[in-house]
Amino acid sequence: TIFAPTDEAFGKLPQGTLDNWLKPENKAELISVLKYHILPGRASAADVGTFSHPKMMQGLSTHIAKDGDRVTIDGSHLVSADIGSSNGVIHAIDAVIQPPKAAFKH
């Protein structure tokens, strides 16, 4: 299950953040950020709404909250859910979520 940031979500990043992640010396940080968007297993939006602190592929837990029909993942909002793919489920989110800086492995 992947929480995929929309194009608009990437546009909200501070200027230069994405370019910085793409530098060879920041490969570990980029991988950590990418894995922080992946929840092992197949989870529908209904399933996701029942989680509170699932462990992401990156190794840390993220915070998921549900308020009525609204689901947030580390403060980002689920904007489109249950997009099927052959190898899992995609949920679009409105922000790029990032693990704490101390979690980046060098």
Image (cartoon, rainbow, N blue to C red):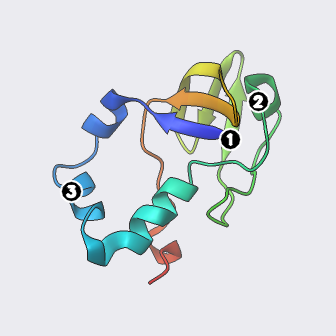
Q: Judging from the image, what secondary structure is the residue with disc 2 in?
A: loop
Residue identifier under label 1: 64
Few, some or many residues within 10 Å of mark 3 (<14, 14–19, 20+): few
Judged left or right of residue 76, residue 64 is right
Rendered-image quadrant of the N terminus: top right
Tell which residue pokes out farthest to the bottom in this image. 106
Three-letter code for the amino acid on which mark 3 is drawn? Asp
Residues 18 and 78: in front is: 18
Mark 3 or 2: in front is 3
Residue identifier under label 2: 49
Q: Which mark is residue 19?
A: 3
Residues 84 and 101: in front is: 84
Q: Are marks 3 and 2 in contact (CB under 8 Å)?
A: no
Tell which residue pokes out farthest to the top in this image. 69
Residue 99: x and y, percent? 51, 61
Residue 101: x and y, percent? 44, 71
Q: Is residue 101 above or below residue 49?
A: below
Rendered-image quadrant of the C terminus: bottom left
Judged left or right of residue 21, residue 77 is right
Judged left or right of residue 102, residue 90 is right
Three-letter code for the amino acid on which mark 2 is drawn? Gly
Q: Are marks 2 and 1 in contact (CB under 8 Å)?
A: yes
Count all numbered tags in the image, as a single digit: 3
Residue depicted at 50% across the width and 65% down the height: 32
Three-letter code for the amino acid on which mark 1 is drawn? Ile
Among numbered discs 3 and 2, the one appearing first in the sequence: 3
Residue 3: x and y, percent? 57, 38
